[in-house]
Amino acid sequence: MDAPPQELHQRLGIRVVSELLTDGQLGDQIVLEEWLDAAEAADSEIWLTFQAEAAGLGGALLDAMSDVPWLPVLSVDGEATAGTTIPISSSGDTGDSLFGDGGFFGGEAGPELASLRIELISEAPGSEPLVAERILLDRVDPADRASGTVLPELLDPMPPAGEVLPALAGVHQLLVSNGAADLRAWAVKRAIAIGWAATFVNQPEQADGLDLHDLFYPLAVANQSIVLASEQLLTGGIGVPDAARAFVGRPRGYLVSFVPYPEVPDGTAIITDLALDDVDVVTSDQAPDGTAARIRLWQGVLQTALETELSLERAAAVDPSTAAVSSVSLAMSGPPALIQPSDAGSVPPAAGALHRALAANQLALLVDTDGSSFWAVDPITGRTRSVSDPGVRPGFIGGGNYVNSSGGGPRYVVDPATGNNMGTIQNGKFTPANRTPPSRCSGGTEYVVVLGCVSIPASMTVGMVTGVLITAMVSWAIVLLELLL
């Protein structure tokens, strides 16, 4: 054969699933599903955003964005694919909604959006798929969900008219780890990203009308350090000499989410979720029984430590008077309490993630009293992960935005390995030599344009979720890149 057949390729899938409540019944609807070849995706910039379907209607609808249809959009190296509409409606419409009786678009009340989640699926030939989920929104009380009785009036309320649903306001980067991250290639990208970010700081008008792929480039490069640290520092260092070695045997997926931080005016936050981070272990005949399980347990602990350290370092990107940092590691105040599957009856009904872990016959080590933060350990394989309900393993840092950067003087950016000119920085503007010119959108609107383009003149960034996020992302990227120098 000239190439391996497609069925032998390792793949990573990403789904966006909306759970709908219709006539008292909960049901899932996949609104986006894309499969990526792991070898190619590891070198790609992959972003998931949620964008208003009403882009072409302009600013007239900004006062009712909570009722406008929204779409998930996946961008891979600037090529965007839109999913299907996420149903957002309100039961018992009173005329304030764009949908339902008396709504702008007319019609009857539709299904209620009960929850929204992202699923990552790792597929490798000869192995069962691995699935991890990140919950963005869950309006259903865990006790109601467990009882099987869910009524529309018992759902958590939606935001008032004119406010964007927080679950739709974030920007999510998917990082793919396949064990082959290249430190030198990343160093070159980092040099380009620093100049790219300096351009935005010194000449903000340069960001107007850019493709999202170009706007997010500095942060995409900064976040790649997570993959590098995991592959080169942790996975390569947890083996047992002459007995066992750990390696990345199947695609892994990490999510880094950039979201509003409502506790602070125009505040933003980064949430790191090492959703799929399994390792394979090969052992020698002389390895003691249980060696592979102990290595996997240790790997899970170290991955959470890595996530915590990254969160602590990224605290430099926000105003220290408003900074908030959290992770399962930081929530530990003493020895964790062991909870076994047979103890599920004593677990509070609200601890949904803990109930799911126990139902999967995992051991749980609680680090708090309400069951929202814990370690989950598979007693057979040793796979260990830290869980913060809702979702899996999020490390969080948020606060008021803080800019600590400088553009620097005119200079050439040179690849030290080849001597090739990577680009120039002059008067704070970076011109890359090996990256195509920024893609500019034609037309533009007063809001996000579906399929990847955005227009953010300075007058629109105040009080507007998308504009605030994009503007703040540049500040975050500069601080994170400087931390890595």
Image (cartoon, grey):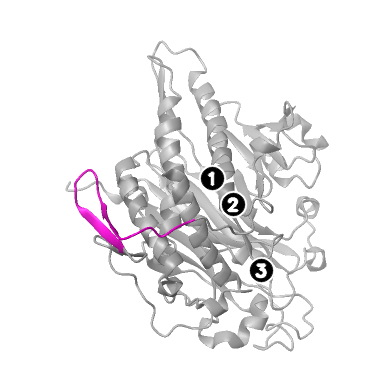
Query: Which numbered disc, 3 or 2, marks the residue closer to the eye?
Result: 3
Label 1 element class:
strand
Disc number placed over residue 275 in the picture, else none = 1
State which quarter of the image contains the C terminus. Answer: top left
Residue at the image position 60 percent from the left and 70 percent from the top: 465
Q: Is residue 305 above or below residue 417?
A: above
Earlier-in-chain disc, 3 versus 1: 3
Amino acid type, residue under disc 1 in the picture? Ala
Q: Which residue is mark 2?
A: 134
Could you classify mark 3 by the number of other residues whose Cα lies within 10 Å: few (under 14), some (14-19), or many (20 or more)? some
Look at the image and give the residue range highlighted in magenta: 405-425
290 or 187, which lies in front? 187
Taking the image as shown, residue 132 lies to the left or right of residue 151, namely left
Magenta residue check for 409: yes
Earlier-in-chain disc, 3 versus 2: 2
Could you classify mark 2 by the number of other residues whose Cα lies within 10 Å: few (under 14), some (14-19), or many (20 or more)? many
Residue 76 is at least partly visible in this image: no
Residues marked 1 and 2 touching at CB (< 8 Å): yes
Q: Which residue is mark 3?
A: 165
Residues marked 3 and 2 touching at CB (< 8 Å): no
Q: CA distance from mark 1 to mark 2?
A: 8 Å
Furthest residue in direction front, as rendered: 409
